[in-house]
Amino acid sequence: MSGMQTAERVASGRGWTVASATLLAGAWAALGFGLYLSPSDRQVWADLEGGGRFALGFAVYLPFLLLTVPILFVVLVGFFWTRTPRSVLVLVVATAFGIAVFAGWVANQPYLFDAQPWLRPFVVSCVFIDLLAALATVPGAQAAARM
């Protein structure tokens, strides 16, 4: 195999890695937009007792903020890591799985959907974009395996 073919395969695997990282960022942004910026029903928020509001903040909003840092790290690694795309693809798939688990956790908070009725489409779009990110790693993994 010539050096040019190897460079093309690395570029191909890297392109899919960047695409996967971009989709991960989009999935997390969709969930964040839904959590923080989607229209909410102020009356339902006001009807929740203090413990319910605290529980939602502690169970959903705080973990979202804390998980933003490692997800941002994986996205930046996906953009700028140039050595072995295989290790980055594993990180991307693990992060996609983590985002899907967290989106499932958000979907299982019944009071949250009462207070934010427009959150459901954002959770669904997050899971869909996350699935696309995981699927985008397949061609990258195939290109990395041929190296």
Image (cartoon, grey):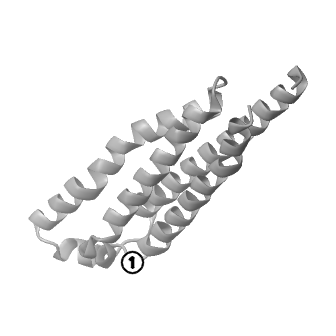
What residue lies at 25% left-to-right and 77% top-to-bottom? 44
Q: Residues within 10 Å of mark 1 (few under 14, many from 20)?
A: some
What residue lies at 43% left-to-right and 59% top-to-bottom? 100
Looking at the image, residue 33 sits to the left or right of residue 10; the answer is left
**Residue sticking out furthest to the front:** 1
What residue lies at 53% left-to-right and 56% top-to-bottom? 27
Q: Would you name the residue on which mark 1 appears?
A: 117
- x, y percentage for residue 45? 24, 71
The quadrant in which residue 66 appears is top left
Judging depth in this view, the residue of 135 and 69 nearest the camera is 135
How many marks do you count on the picture?
A: 1
- x, y percentage for residue 2? 89, 23
Q: Amino acid at mark 1?
A: Pro
Looking at the image, residue 106 sits to the left or right of residue 76; the answer is left
Q: Is 30 drawn above or below residue 120 in the view shown? A: above
Q: Is 47 drawn above or below residue 70 in the view shown? A: below
Rendered-image quadrant of the C terminus? top right
The secondary element bearing badge 1 is classed as loop
- x, y percentage for residue 89? 58, 40
Q: Is 33 drawn above or below residue 123 in the view shown? A: above
Judging depth in this view, the residue of 54 and 146 nearest the camera is 146
- x, y percentage for residue 146? 74, 37
Looking at the image, residue 139 sits to the left or right of residue 53; the answer is right
Q: Is 129 drawn above or below residue 64 in the view shown? A: below
The quadrant in which residue 37 appears is bottom left
Rendered-image quadrant of the N terminus? top right
What residue lies at 39% left-to-right and 78% top-to-bottom? 117
